[in-house]
Amino acid sequence: MTETEGVVDYLVDERRSAEFDVEAMKILWAGGKRQFDVTDRMARLAATDPEFKKDGRIHQGRREFVKNSLRKVAHAWKLTNQLSLTEEEASLLRYFVDEPSSADIHWGMFIPAIKGQGTDEQQQKWLPLAYNMQIMGSYAQTELGHGSNIRGLETTATFDHMTDEFVLHSPTLTSRKWWPGGLARVSTHAIVYARLIVDGQEHGVHGFIVQLRSLDDHQRLPGVFLDDIGMKFGNGGYNAIDNGCLQLDHVRVPRDHMLMRVVQVMREGKVVESGVPRQLIYGTMVFVRQMIVNDASRFLSKAVCIATRYSAVRRQFGSQNGLETQVIDYKTQQSRLFPLLASAYAFRIVGEWVSWLYTDVNERLQAKDFSTLPEVHACTAGLKVVTTSVTADGIEECRKLCGGHGYLVSSGLPELFAVYVPACTYEGDNTVLLLQVARFLMKTVAKLGSGEPFAGTIAYMGRAEHLMQSRCPVRKAEDWLNPDVVIEAFEARSLRMSLACAQNLSRFSDPDEGFLELSTDLVGAALAHCQLIVVSKFIEKLQQDIPGDGVKEQLQALCSIYALSIVNKHLGDFLATYSITPKQGSLAQDALRSLFSKVRPNAVALVDAFNHTDHFLGSTLGRYDGNVYASLYEEALKDPMNQTEVLDGYQEYVRPILKMQVRNSRL
Amino acid sequence: MTETEGVVDYLVDERRSAEFDVEAMKILWAGGKRQFDVTDRMARLAATDPEFKKDGRIHQGRREFVKNSLRKVAHAWKLTNQLSLTEEEASLLRYFVDEPSSADIHWGMFIPAIKGQGTDEQQQKWLPLAYNMQIMGSYAQTELGHGSNIRGLETTATFDHMTDEFVLHSPTLTSRKWWPGGLARVSTHAIVYARLIVDGQEHGVHGFIVQLRSLDDHQRLPGVFLDDIGMKFGNGGYNAIDNGCLQLDHVRVPRDHMLMRVVQVMREGKVVESGVPRQLIYGTMVFVRQMIVNDASRFLSKAVCIATRYSAVRRQFGSQNGLETQVIDYKTQQSRLFPLLASAYAFRIVGEWVSWLYTDVNERLQAKDFSTLPEVHACTAGLKVVTTSVTADGIEECRKLCGGHGYLVSSGLPELFAVYVPACTYEGDNTVLLLQVARFLMKTVAKLGSGEPFAGTIAYMGRAEHLMQSRCPVRKAEDWLNPDVVIEAFEARSLRMSLACAQNLSRFSDPDEGFLELSTDLVGAALAHCQLIVVSKFIEKLQQDIPGDGVKEQLQALCSIYALSIVNKHLGDFLATYSITPKQGSLAQDALRSLFSKVRPNAVALVDAFNHTDHFLGSTLGRYDGNVYASLYEEALKDPMNQTEVLDGYQEYVRPILKMQVRNSRL
């Protein structure tokens, strides 16, 4: 340890052992110098403003907790205006406040939905109100009885010719909107998704802007019934949000409150296509998924940062110079932690690529080129699944890697898990999405030999013949460090799994029945394809110039760890498809062990490169200075249990128990 | 659905489709008719007493929450005395109250430690006080800086010749006791583990009974400093317990407060062995692990019960007679849910076997036969790991299988997870334990060919030569239903993995270094061995007579599902060791699919057989009657957020935001 200006750095030796330029890696992680500067500035703004302190929030009751979160929303809004923050800065500030709030859905779903599905006039009317927060909006799609299957929604919007209005109605208990954030008490408006009915005819599900509360006194409007849906996973987390239940009893909205960018209802009740291509809506979907992939890398990076620093501080068993061994030196710890460290970097890099993909798709959509949409849809769906599921499991794994103390809320890990894990379910349940990817793969495989070209993430299918016959050339552990070898093994595995599925499907006379029956195999094939995408995007990145001493070498090691730990974890796939031999699988293990040793001295520096402030991490175990034990004790003392020496309930419950026998003996 | 006396059973069709005698299965699950009766009686006692209602506990602040839990402790204690419950009944009642309490450690650790480590005199003195709850005890082993490695504990107990006392002291911050339940505010006593020091000589770590608080007014005694360690994972759960931090400042206890069953300190300071074999302590360890294995099956059965019933109620996509498809009919759902259902049964059966093993070990210990101890230690350590890790992950998987609603606390699943997951860390971290199993396996393998007999769970090692050459005979999917085939594949995999490890280890000149370097492979081999134990105990059970129509058939299907889903999940192991071929792996998948279809009509009845009351399940989604949606809504209404129509914080924070622009526009 070292002491500078009274601050002890328990991790200084770890930082000294780094073999790369940490500042350069920080810039790479941030996505460039400009992004680093703005991100760093906003992170520090949130970290240093006392209004954003995280103290004590876990000890609050539900209502107090929601109120406290709104206090931060109001303060962030005040700063946004006072400091004239740009949209990017304001959004980063909200992000670094790092507490879910009822306004998240306003910025994250309400505004994007109007932008994506509203006509130009609708955007001109509603967006300024929303951007200025004169109204606060929620996004009401999911119903009590209906989640993934949007076509199953029961809420109705019936056109009334007489008044030129839609009548929105919840006909059943299960049709009530359920889950939308901010819906129960905070939002003034919501986009409500409902089945459009005109003259008794159904015209699919559409979004309608519905005012829920008076802008004068915030009282709910007639026919609008709003309830909070109750407590959610975690001490704090999403309990700061008033996720709501909405029942509509024949609530009327003007005709122009239906979002009509693609489908329009005319005054006389005619339902017409606007001429704007339906596919434009996919742009929003790619945008949301791009956010999810990038979020995954940030969440995972927080967990990995905490677990890595604490593993370097914590000592257990063994003995060198009288000290126990640092936990991070155990191969069992490394083999669980370093693949997650590698995944955080992999997801950051693939996240950057998906952001590029979003721009590319938008340009194509403007030019009415829809040719890449199916592949982009499959690819982004698959990346959503891979990144969210690894991140959710990874946070929990990091918590376990911190031993008992990871179970304390002050470690930051329980809340990180509780806040993150819904990502596996929202915006497409992960299993449902993988089946969509599989469907796309089966369509692609069916075109093999047709001469049709394969582009983008399925380009490798064009080399099917080669990949069916290729043999993995690995003969010694180091051969696994060759990116071409790795890619080809992943391509062979993915292609062969898809082809095996297609072959098995062909045995069914009813293809839909076959798809249902073989769905677990199909999910496996889809996952293999998605993992290949991450590996290949990571490798592509490494073919570019990467500034900074030693930065590229670290990323190469992480890329190999990412890929080889998948080989190890999914060894059954690789062996069953004969993509590699058992001996080669064992050599991959050997290669991994060497890579772990290579990364070990750089581990703390690699998590420093995430540039997380202690405020943002919110963890006693993950502190930058490694002063873990004093911090654990200090946080513990803040618990209300420590405010009194005498226990609440001692007189009523404990004393009578302890004295019962004594009393009996006097009888 | 059907209606009887006003009660609608939404799952009646599911129950009608069962092909076995559910009542007979209930008795098997309970472990016999007598056990069923007493368990059922105590479950109903807890379920029907209004004092044990679970309502509203998640909305309480920390102190109120602890107090509420103590209220239930006092009430359970009152009932225990009023109804003159037996020890078994009282313990079951506490179990079915189903809320962690500060008294758990008193019954679960304090009393067993005195029984296991105290001399006869010490037991005579302390046990009546403890059984009558005239004192309440905690168990203080773990320190802030020291968990798994007991030899690293820093607390000291120094013998003072002059006064015939031990002086207990916490010399550093990291030496403070940290984690013990009930320690901070409730317990009057604790067993404190400390390094025994006599005349400057260290004599290892021993337990000392230390009084913490006055029995008159519950004030802490001089030199005793107690704090609560703060909030833990989950809304409720273990936050009901005052896990504590204990600092001792030269606290003196009489010499006879050291637990001296095995090692004794004499008046003159001589440290002597009592003559009672050290190995007796292993009896307690086996007892605790037997409890953990049986607990795992109960926790997993709760999660599986909730997910199965809700999967039968919930409908998504597809369409039959206008209704969407029941989620439980999807193969993707079955392939995640049914292996967990099978695991719950497998762990119940292996738990029963470990309970028998405990009796057997105790008989041997009494007869000073210590020959089976190493094998029993390895086997119970391994079973602890397999059952706790599958259960922790399985609860979270069940939560995900319930879609979005599983994230609501009212589903019961978030709390079930938060309460269960520490089992992976306490009583031996799972990775540390697997390495102990691996060490035992390496010792066993070293004896191959020595002519020494192999008994118990390693008997198969005696057939090493055969197993190294055996070939799996599976040619069609149904061949996998043959238990002999399954067992041999598991035995071959396990033996070959162990032998491969031994071979790789032999290449290291320093065996300890080799063990560290190859630790991940060793963990893999240990896991394979432990999974074999579960599979073989399940199969052994099925060789017995099992009463009840169709009961055995269901268990056979579940046993095959359990085994084959491991083949599927760990396919890499089976293929890499050439224990099966890729084709046979694929046939195992086919067999699994058929088994899922076979279990499907019985699924709800199979979870009914757990005989869980709605009180014990505490789940809107897992209700016996399947009336899920009304229940979700009813529970939501209890949230404090729904007590007022106007939001706390509206005036202070929301209104100013909404009105800010209006004010600006007036300027």
Image (cartoon, coloured by chain):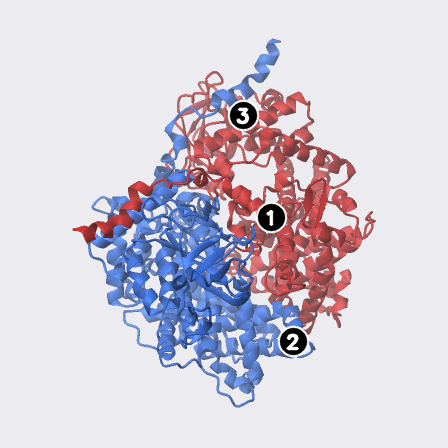
Chain colours: A red, B blue
The verdict on a common chain for dots 2 and 3 is no
Q: Position of residue A138 (x, y in %)?
A: 52, 30
Q: Is residue A158 left or right of residue A480?
A: left
The kind of residue on which mark 3 rests is Met
Using the image, name the chain to which the residue with label 2 belongs.
Answer: B
Q: Quadrant of the C terminus of chain B?
A: top right
As drawn, the residue found furthest toward the left would be A667
Nearer the observer, disc 1 or disc 3? 1
Mark nearer the viewer, 1 or 2: 1
Q: Secondary structure at mark 1?
A: helix
The crowd level at tag 1 (other Cα within 10 Å; few <14, some 14-19, many 20+) is many
Nearest-to-viewer mark from 2 and 3: 2
Looking at the image, residue B227 lies above or below residue A160: below
Whether callout 1 and callout 2 share a subunit is answered: no
Question: Which secondary structure, mark 2?
Answer: helix
Q: Is residue B12 above or below residue B428?
A: above
Q: Is residue B612 left or right of residue B331?
A: left
Question: How many residues crowd mark 2 within 10 Å: few (<14), some (14–19), many (20+)?
Answer: few
Q: Nearer the viewer, residue B458 or A243?
A: B458
Q: Label 3: which residue?
A: A136
Write down the quadrant of residue B287 in the picture.
bottom left
For the point 44% across and 18% down, the residue is A162
Give the residue at mark 1.
Answer: A628
Chain of the residue under label 1: A
- Kindly indicate whether the residue at mark 3 contacts the one at mark 1 (C-beta within 8 angstroms): no
The answer to whether mark 2 and mark 3 are in CB contact below 8 A is no
The residue most toward the front is B162
